[in-house]
Amino acid sequence: MKLTYPEVGGSLHRDLPAGYHHLRVRVPVGPPQAFTAAVEAVLTWRMHRRAGLYVDAGPARPGLRITGRLGHPRFGMPVVCEVVAVVDEPERAGFAYGTVTGHPERGEEAFLVVVEDGRTWLEVTAFSRPAAWYARAVTAIVPLIQRAYARRLGRMLRRLV
């Protein structure tokens, strides 16, 4: 399996690649003191698991392949991705993963915890387009689902910290 898009690392930049649906969601998580716990929950997949992604993986690190299911451990939508970058800065940390062969979408998503304006935030940034026929069939609702899931991740992270 290999990455299914050429713009590796693009979700970490201000200008997202053309030709994709773009997603930017920012959710408040807590005070600045919540940063460390929030980063740990993001990097260890606790936030994702709490939001319904069934994945068995170690902490996020570049090159880590994850295979999981969204919604149900046996029957949910398959999620096959590779961590392409980890960010570790004093007030900005998290990771980005990209789709690999077998994922219904093509693109990348970043999950960053940021301290700004006296608060800790979860920022979810993505670019994607359909890769599988069934993803193309529901193209109109995918952005709505992605936005709802990103907000759910923020709510779950807020509960964890």
Image (cartoon, rainbow, N blue to C red):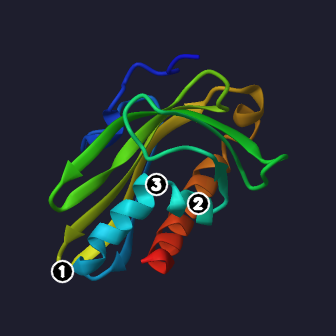
Tell me which corner region of the image, top left, top right, bottom left or bottom right, holds residue 148: bottom right
Element assignment for label 3: loop
For image coordinates 47% across by 69% down, the residue present is: 154
**Which quadrant would residue 40 be assigned to in this image?**
bottom left
- Label 1 element class: loop
Determine whether, in the image, residue 128 is placed left or right of residue 52: left
* Residue 120 position (above or below residue 100): below
Q: Position of residue 128 (x, y in %)?
A: 51, 36
Q: Residues within 10 Å of mark 2 (few under 14, many from 20)?
A: some
Q: Quadrant of the C terminus?
A: bottom left
Q: Which residue is mark 2?
A: 149
Q: Does residue 129 sit above or below 120 in this rendering?
A: above
Which amino acid type is marked by label 3? Thr
The residue tagged 1 is 118
Q: Give the mark nearest the N terminus, 1 or 3.
A: 3
Q: Which mark is residue 86?
A: none
Q: In the image shown, does 30 or 140 lie closer to the viewer?
A: 30
Q: Position of residue 64 (x, y in %)?
A: 47, 33
Picture quadrant of residue 139: top right
Picture layout, residue 35 above or below residue 80: below
Query: Residue type at mark 2?
Result: Tyr
The local secondary structure at tag 2 comes to helix
| Residue on which the image places disc 3 | 44
Quarter containing the N terminus = top right
User: As drawn, is 82 to the left or to the right of 6?
Assistant: right
**Relative image position of residue 33 (x, y in whole percent):** 24, 79
Q: Nearer the viewer, residue 32 or 150?
A: 32
Mark 2 → mark 1, Cα distance in angstroms: 25 Å
